[in-house]
Amino acid sequence: MTITAPRGTKDILPEEISSWQYLETICRSLFKRYHFSEIRTPIFESTDLFDRGIGDSTDIVQKEMYTFSDKSERSLTLRPEGTASVVRSFLQHKRYANLPQKLYYMGPMFRYERPQAGRFRQFHQIGLESFGSADPYNDAELIALCVDLFSELGLNDITININTIGCSVSRQLYSEKIRQLVLPHLSQLSEDDQRKYETNPLRLLDSKNKTTQTFLAGLPDMSDVLSQDSKDHFHQVLNYLDELSISYTIDSKLVRGLDYYTETVFEVTSASLGAQNALCGGGRYNHLVESLSGPPTPAIGCAFGVERLLSLLDLSTFLYNDPLDVYFVPLGHNQRQVCFKLVNELRRAGLKCEVGLSDSLKYELKTASKLDSKFAAIFGEEEAINNLILIKDMKNRTQESVSLSNLLGKVST
Ligand code: HAM
């Protein structure tokens, strides 16, 4: 039986890789302009980090983590997201001594979810985390960066959904209001929503269950319980966005699925995607650093889903087109030996080369053509005796014998 990639994972084949590299290049250049620097953290961390960082009550920690014990019986988890890891590194290396810190990362994340279009068990995120300022300016700047990225990628069909979930006190108050409304109907909630009721009632707001939503119908707006500081903060974020004419939709039900958020939360969706329409999600997490035993450090960040972004790009622009410069055809063992040296010289000079080893001229010329090589360099016994090599221009179908010392000059024209 052949072995295939595990469910929910996929290979990124050479034909697709240029679109990944394109996206990464665009991001790196944009992030640099916004003064973010790259950080790379391990793919696995102590399970404890995610339990404490992402929150016990979240779907991720409850059911989606790939957790295993190593030989020393340490519990480790493949990272389900990047924020907790970056905070861990920020603390471990005392980066808080030099604030602000603006960091970005790119790489695979792992969640045991039910695979479907746009949802994988190994997927890739490009994320940004900015530490050290609680100013609404930073919230707006991060959203402006997202808008710039979508515009550079030519993606217009996007919506920025934004909300504030206030400080921990207002979250507490609002959670109580939700509990009071839902309590009489508790037994009618799904098992999942009953868990949310117990652990984080705010999450009931984005429950997909219609019955749950009807019980929440009389819920006052979150803004009723927000402190004046939270209202002012949100108001200023929106003012900054207006300054750049960035359009957004205020979605009072947006709470996000991770426990660390405070104040501003946002999600970018695309109508061109199916059920899994979130391209990017993020928000403030002013207490996460502290909750992982660090000094009080306000922070904000977001992450893009790479597979979802790429699914919206016109991939015909990235056709796999990477032809060879020279395809060598040595005919006979001794000729191979000489070619080994010639190829090496050309590669060192920056040319892309390959060697055909079948000893069949007809077959190798076909291969050179298939690989779209600019030149075929044929080196038989007669050429070897005369210190020559036959260079065939594969496009013009012309050929010329050149001396070995002139090979580089001929094929680099
Ligand atoms: P998240 O909303 O869980 O946030 O994920 C961010 C993005 O990753 C989503 O909007 C989506 O595009 C993509 N994504 C998530 N799960 C999957 C999946 N199973 N398959 C494919 N794509 C997926 C976070 O992870 C936060 N750490 C973002 C953040 C950074 N907040 C503050 N800083």
Image (cartoon, helix red, strand yellow):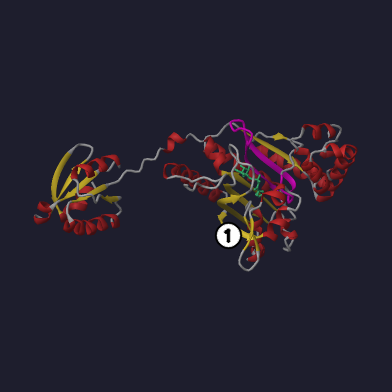
- Secondary structure type for disc 1: loop
Relative image position of residue 340 (x, y in whole percent)? 24, 58
- Is 109 displayed left or right of 234 in the figure? left
Residue 100: tell me if it is visible: no
Q: Position of residue 104 (x, y in %)?
A: 58, 52
Magenta residues, start to end: 257-284
Q: Which residue is mark 1?
A: 42
Residue 69 on image: x %, y % = 64, 62
In the picture, residue 43 is in which quadrant?
A: bottom right
Residue 132 figure quarter: bottom right
Q: Is residue 165 above or below residue 92?
A: above
Residue 364 placement, left or right of 153:
left
* Residue that appears at 35% across and 43% down: 322
Location of residue 387 with respect to 373 vertically, above or below? below
Instruction: Name the amino acid type tagged 1.
Output: Pro
Q: Quadrant of ligand 1?
A: top right
The quarter of the picture where residue 183 lies is: top right
Residue 165 relative to residue 113: left or right: right
Can you see residue 328? Answer: yes
* x and y percentages locating residue 140 in the rendered image: 67, 43
Q: Is residue 317 magenta?
A: no
Mark 1 Cα shell of 10 Å, populated few (<14), some (14-19), many (≥20): few
